Amino acid sequence: MKNYTIILTVLIAIAIETNAQIPNNGFESLSGWFTGNATLSTDHYPSSIGNYSIKLENQLPIANNLSYGYAVSGNVNNGCIPSFPISGHPNQLRGYYKCFPLNNDTIQIGLLLFNNGVWVAGAELTTTNTVSSWTSFTIPISAYTVADSATITLAAFYNDTTCGMPYGPFGNSTLYVDNISFDNLITSVPDAGRSAINIVLYPNPASENVTFTNNNLNNEDITIYIYNIMGALVKAEKLINNQQQINVNDLDNGIYFVSSKSKDQTSNQKLIIQR
């Protein structure tokens, strides 16, 4: 019960974790996505979350499907089959984007929901307009009863959501997407040094060791809890003499959430492990 309570606290305090069922929804890498011509961009949003967004750009003339500005969740170039499990009953797909369509391309962000492998609902944003600044989007999901899985597609051209032939690409159009989620728009993640305990962790991103320092310099007992993106506790260590170095070499690359707790105070931060 104690660990369950801690996990719930982290889920509430850090909005991004509530949407962990979408694989790599903050695009700190391209892991979890099949991509055509897609790269990571340091132009990302919100600025307090992560370091990258996904950039999709059509490369003309088209040589093959890897020239398309295209990404689909999962490991198969097929946006018409389930690619990740979902829970609950999401009603909207939300996130941030900006785009630069050229030569009559139609930018598309699409979602399909499935139940037992059968398509039951969908959501789609399309535009031919230039959106030059980061803009939030909210796409209502069509009515459905039950869904157990989903697939998300991102394209710098119109990729038919009825799973027909794509319409385009016609130009060197570009689409940027970041921090997609179900229902709740991701707005911020607490930064180091802004919490009650004032715990600072570094380096971040980390590869082998992370140092935690309590800048309040008090003698409170503080425990560091590290959770993976699915909310599972992967490490727990006490802060010793207001500073502790924790080895994270046994953790995979990715995003983790750190909850530092004393008797009366807490600090919640994001940690990226990258090698």
Image: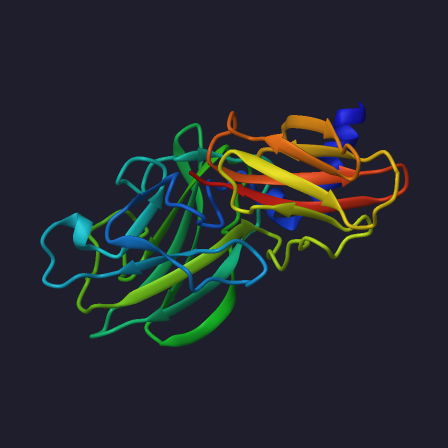
Q: Nearer the viewer, residue 44 or 203?
A: 203
Above or below, comparing residue 214 to residue 224 in the picture: below
- At x 75%, y 27%, the residue is 4
Q: Is residue 241 left or right of residue 149?
A: right
How far from the left and from the top, in percent, is residue 259? 72, 39
Q: Looking at the rendering, which quadrant does residue 113 occupy? A: top left
Question: Coloring scheme of the render?
Answer: rainbow
Q: Could you tell me if residue 16 is visible in this image? A: yes
Left or right for 159, reference 61: right
On-image quarter of the C terminus: top left
- Give the quarter of the image for residue 240: top right
Residue 160 showing in the rendered view: no
In the rendered image, the residue lying farthest to the front is 241
Q: Position of residue 39 (x, y in %)?
A: 31, 54
- Residue that appears at 24% across and 49% down: 36
> Whole-percent x and y of residue 184?
62, 53
In the displayed structure, 7 sits above or below 18; it is above
Q: Nearer the viewer, residue 192 or 97?
A: 192
Q: Is residue 171 left or right of residue 51?
A: left
Front-lying residue, 147 or 100: 100
Total labels drawn = 0
In the image, residue 58 sits, relative to residue 132, either above or below, namely above
Residue 94 pos. (x, y %): 53, 56
Q: Toward the viewer: 208 or 92?
A: 208
Identity of the residue drawn at 76% across and 46% down: 267
Q: Quarter of the image containing the N terminus?
A: top right
Residue 230, placed above or below residue 89:
above
